[in-house]
Amino acid sequence: MFKKNILLLICSISFAQETTQIEIEPIQTDRPDQTETSSLTPVKMFQIETGFSYQKIDSYNSEYVVPTVLWKYGFSEIIELRLITEFHKNESFNTYNEGISPVLIGCKIRISEENGILPKISLIGHLAFPNLAKTEYKNNYLAPEFRFAIQHTLSEKFSFGYNLGAEWDGFLAKATFLYTTALGYSITDKLGSYIELYGFAPEQQTANHNFDGGFTYLITNNFMIDASGGFGITKNAPDYFYALGFSFRI
């Protein structure tokens, strides 16, 4: 009788584990593209998205981010808590600066789920805190940013997402408006790809536009790696850039 109970217990645990694995959808990330996903981190789960990026701004200026880390926690069915930390290295002529840029604290709020032609929509907002940074990278004021993340499923293989929003630099009261558009294609169940057009339009200044693309590979439902790269389309955009990273949740 005792052996039978143990066997039933083991079977029940195995079944529960298998059910849990089936119920958890593959990880959805905000990297490597600029288009943030409208999906939220599952409730009571932590998700970390990190990586390295290099950007050649022009002939004299370049920037490394080593690393950038987005920390996420599924607070509820409609709210995801977010923290962004980045370590920057900037090179210009013979000068060199490095340090932590202002830490961003914020959240993602689910607005609607996809229903037919109606898209999945979330609102993302952050505040950059000027004192949570190295002196060379500090802002004068709190710097807010927000964007609406919108997503359409076009077919089993294709998806289309776009973001619309604005951000402030913490020095001037003028906003920089932003847009992103990304077309995703699932090559296999594990290998994904995308191409993207995005840009920034500061008030009273010329907008800059960029193009990029990349790949993601799902190692498990909770672990993904990525690679991406792109270039500026307009003269005031960066010459080129690339990034490598990984994301996981627990």
Image (tube, grey):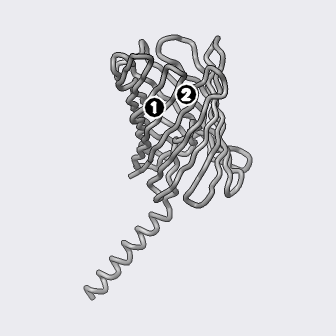
Residue at image point 50% right, 56% down: 218
The residue that label 1 is drawn on is 106
Give the amino acid at mark 2: Phe
The residue that label 2 is drawn on is 146
Looking at the picture, how far across and down is residue 22, in whole percent? Answer: 50, 65
Looking at the picture, how far across and down is residue 142, in whole percent? Answer: 44, 18
Position of 173 relative to 219 (above/below): above
Looking at the picture, how far across and down is residue 250, in whole percent? Answer: 38, 52
Q: Furthest-right residue in view?
A: 117
Left or right: 132 in relation to 211: left
Looking at the picture, how far across and down is residue 91, in whole percent? Answer: 42, 22
Quarter location, residue 82: top left
Q: Residues within 10 Å of mark 1 (few under 14, many from 20)?
A: some
Position of 19 relative to 32 (above/below): below
Position of 161 relative to 141 (above/below): below
Give the amino acid at mark 1: Gly
